[in-house]
Amino acid sequence: MRWLAGVLLFWAVPATAVTCEDVDYEGRSYTACTVDATTENLGLFHHDADGAVIGSFSALEDHPDVHALAFAMNAGMYHDDRSPVGHYVEDGVQTMRVITNAGPGNFGLLPNGVFCINDDSAQVYETLDYVETAPACRDATQSGPMLVIDGALHPRFLPHSTSRFVRNGVGTSADGTTAVFVISNDNVSFHEFGSFFRDYLAVPNALYFDGKVSRLYARDQGRSDFGFSSLGPMVAVTE
């Protein structure tokens, strides 16, 4: 599995919390950030203690619980008021229930999924599987569509789609020890983006976070994407 090289590199350089690398695949550029979920402080952030939406990487850096920010990415779709569209749990507190029905937009393009984080694991679940198995998640964010489901691309993805955007998402290893967060540096279709997770990273399950608003903070790359609108849920590795 090609993502394993990133994991080995991470262990070879213990001072770096996250390993991010730029990858050219099938003529398109991606940045993939590998996180060891068993050792790193991986979690979701949405609002501060006063209930105000954090909304940006700079505000996240100023969060009282964040001493140093190694990595961050937008992590799930949100409404105009920045509240999560789907299921959301942060530090054991649920603020939005699971949405299981189909609907408009990418989120409702079933099957969608849930990204579940615990102190020593991270796992992508298809939503109905998540409801059935009811895993205990310290943090969880629902988004959609699923990109890869048990090694297969989402059945609605079209190989020759002309719908292309900068997109971001996450894939997890089968044992839940490794999460790989990816943002495309070029406009890509769902089929191309999902294929990167399935064929290059070889992860069994992967979840789409969003498109057009996709942003990445990667300290080891000196990268902090800027946007004119604030974000909703964010996932981050903090130290």
Image: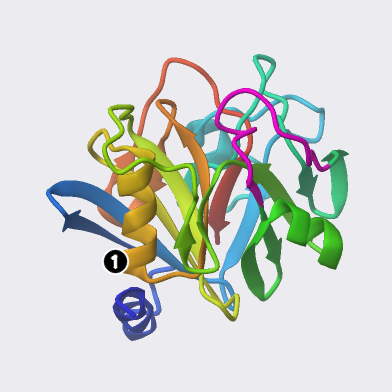
Instruction: Confirm whether residue 155 shows in the render.
Output: yes
Q: Read off the residue under disc 1.
A: 200
- 101 lies left or right of 142: right
Q: Determine if the magenta segment contains residue 141.
A: no
The quarter in which the C terminus is drawn is bottom right
- 138 lies left or right of 120: right
The quarter in which the N terminus is drawn is bottom left
Which residue is at 35% across, 73% downward?
3
- Boundaries of the magenta span: 98-113
Which residue is at 25% across, 40% downward?
185
Q: Measured from the top left, where is residue 83 in percent x and y?
A: 72, 26
Main secondary structure found in the magenta portion: loop
Q: Furthest residue to the left?
A: 27
Residue toward you, 77 or 222: 77
Q: Determine if the magenta segment contains residue 104.
A: yes
Instruction: Confirm whether residue 64 shows in the render.
Output: no
Which residue is at 85% across, 40% downward?
97
- 134 lies left or right of 229: right
Q: Measured from the top left, where is residue 218 in percent x and y?
A: 36, 50
Query: Is residue 109 shown above or below 217?
Result: above
Quick one: SS at disc 1?
A: helix
Which residue is at 38% across, 69% downward?
16
Q: Amino acid at mark 1?
A: Tyr
Residue toward you, 9 or 67: 9
Q: Residues within 10 Å of mark 1 (few under 14, many from 20)?
A: some
Q: Measured from the top left, where is residue 135 in percent x and y?
A: 82, 66
- 117 lies left or right of 194: right
Q: How is the image coloured?
A: rainbow
Query: Is residue 139 shown above or below 164?
Result: below
Q: Measured from the top left, where is residue 138 in percent x and y?
A: 79, 60
